[in-house]
């Protein structure tokens, strides 16, 4: 599920966040107002219930499900109280960056999987106890492309709750399709068919300025398309060492040219007009006919009840089979600084390893299941979000691979998309963009060694 990023911190912000973290934050939504007792055990010396804290970023469906599940957990475990605190996404990132270093973070954290191994460095996260689940056992429980975000140095550090998937589907405006004489659902055999329909849907005013984009692919989604295209062309975006990047290849050149052609050859999108806009807002305001991204996009429809939309299946960009580099989605980790590891893992197990609880969270949060058994038996998830049927019915979930280490996930996506955008607008050549992507990506990797 795609989220936005706030990148840099000033010294004053860092200091204030450290103070805030130490004081429990200003955005807490506590299930209890107690603080952690100073004891390394699962019960307080006084006989009172131990108190552990859980952090997450503010996200309506996830928050409701987490609160409901935490209440249920405390009813079943009266010896454990849970304080649930949430932060807006930018503050959440900043707070994690400072508090994990200072040792003031929550006991249990709902963390994005692609971040987990970076936070695990320096023994800042607890390894999953083998008595709870081994990596081999976890591979039979979760999709590997999601699980591997939590697995590094032969150690498992947490459990994915969702499958972060940006492929296999696209959001469409059925009214625009009808006006253009395009069937819904469309009968697309190859991505050339998608582009042909996108051209029919694109509109210009009498000055030649684009007023409606036929197909919007930008930001993180554009990077995912670039990586997926390399894989579908039979290439690899990783160098021989499996760690560094190798974008300047024939497959990389063809993948980037594909994105450039959407602008310069087929003229279905204008990055100057929409490149910095919010994808869902542009779509629901009727400025975009087709918006590429995961099923999370459909959640934006609640703010625009008058805009009709559908989410339909896409063919691969190249070849006949979807391949995909997937972020590891939101999941659960436990801090190495917790005073109550047994209680913390008990909560983590309750939230992420119980099939019924996992299904409830996926349904309320409108996410794709990271647990294999839930994906095979989605039940109420499809009632809440029928569009999840698109990825669940495709081959992409089984064929996806974990995207791998990025150095700094959000900086990586920002830098790669910046170079793609420059190539799209003709500011630099495709070759120059690939060279700069590779240079910047490898600098991020080397800076994290």
Image (cartoon, rainbow, N blue to C red):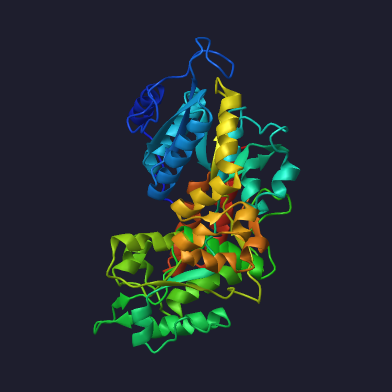
Residue reaching furthest right? 136
Q: Quadrant of the C terminus?
A: top right
Q: Nearer the viewer, residue 30 or 104?
A: 30
Quadrant housing residue 340: top right
Residue reaching furthest bottom? 181
Can residue 448 be seen at all in this image of the molecule? no
Q: Residue at x 64, y 66 (%)?
A: 323
Residue 441 in the image, given as x and y percentages of width and height: 57, 50
From the viewer's perspective, tell me whether residue 106 is left or right of residue 327: left
Q: Residue at x 55, y 17 (%)?
A: 43
Residue 178 in the image, given as x and y percentages of width and height: 36, 85
Work out whether 12 lies above or below 8. Answer: above
Residue 399 in the image, given as x and y percentages of width and height: 67, 63
Q: Residue at x 53, y 28 (%)?
A: 77
Q: Residue at x 35, y 68 (%)?
A: 283
Work out whether 330 lies above or below 226. Answer: above
Work out whether 369 lies above or below 125. Answer: below
Can residue 26 be seen at all in this image of the molecule? yes
From the viewer's perspective, tell me whether residue 10 is left or right of residue 72: left
From the viewer's perspective, tell me whether residue 42 is left or right of residue 144: left
Q: Nearer the viewer, residue 126 or 114?
A: 126
Work out whether 216 lies above or below 3. Answer: below
Residue 372 in the image, given as x and y percentages of width and height: 64, 54
Q: Nearer the viewer, residue 18 or 307?
A: 307
Q: Nearer the viewer, residue 249 or 178?
A: 178
């Amino acid at each position: 599920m795609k989220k936005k990023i706030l990148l840099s911190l000033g010294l004053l912000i860092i200091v204030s966040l450290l103070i805030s973290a130490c004081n429990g934050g200003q955005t807490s939504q506590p299930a209890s107002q107690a603080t952690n007792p100073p004891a390394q055990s699962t019960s307080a010396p006084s006989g009172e219930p131990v108190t552990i804290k859980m952090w997450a970023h503010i996200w309506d469906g996830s928050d409701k499900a987490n609160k409901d599940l935490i209440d249920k957990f405390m009813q079943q475990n009266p010896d454990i109280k849970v304080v649930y605190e949430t932060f807006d996404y930018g503050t959440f990132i900043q707070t994690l960056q400072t508090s994990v270093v200072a040792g003031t973070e929550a006991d249990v954290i709902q963390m994005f999987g692609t971040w987990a191994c970076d936070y695990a460095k320096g023994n800042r996260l607890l390894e999953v106890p083998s008595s709870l689940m081994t990596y081999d056992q976890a591979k039979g429980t979760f999709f590997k492309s999601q699980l591997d975000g939590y697995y590094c140095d032969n150690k498992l550090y947490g459990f994915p709750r969702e499958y972060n998937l940006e492929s296999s589907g696209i959001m469409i405006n059925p009214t625009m399709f009808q006006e253009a004489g395009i069937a819904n659902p469309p009968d697309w055999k190859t991505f050339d068919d998608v582009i042909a329909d996108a051209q029919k849907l694109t509109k210009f005013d009498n000055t030649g300025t684009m007023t409606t984009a036929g197909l919007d692919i930008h930001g993180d989604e554009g990077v995912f398309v670039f990586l997926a295209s390399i894989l579908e062309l039979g290439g690899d975006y990783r160098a021989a060492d499996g760690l560094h990047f190798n974008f300047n290849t024939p497959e990389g050149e063809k993948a980037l040219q594909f994105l450039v052609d959407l602008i310069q050859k087929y003229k279905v999108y204008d990055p100057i007009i929409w490149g910095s806009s919010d994808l869902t807002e542009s779509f629901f305001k009727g400025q975009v006919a087709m918006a590429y991204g995961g099923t999370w996009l459909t959640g934006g429809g609640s703010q625009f009840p008058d805009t009709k939309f559908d989410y339909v299946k896409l063919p691969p960009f190249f070849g006949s089979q979807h391949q995909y580099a997937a972020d590891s989605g939101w999941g659960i980790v436990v801090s190495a600084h917790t005073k109550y590891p047994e209680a913390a893992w008990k909560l983590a197990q309750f939230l992420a390893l119980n099939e019924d609880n996992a299904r409830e969270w996926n349904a309320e949060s409108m996410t794709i299941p990271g647990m294999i058994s839930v994906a095979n038996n989605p039940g109420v998830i499809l009632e809440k979000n029928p569009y999840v049927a698109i990825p669940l019915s495709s081959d992409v979930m089984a064929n996806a691979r974990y995207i791998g280490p990025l150095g700094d996930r959000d900086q990586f996506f920002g830098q790669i998309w910046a170079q793609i955008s420059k190539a799209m607008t003709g500011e630099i050549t495709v070759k120059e963009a690939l060279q700069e992507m590779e240079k910047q990506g490898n600098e991020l990797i080397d800076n994290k060694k």
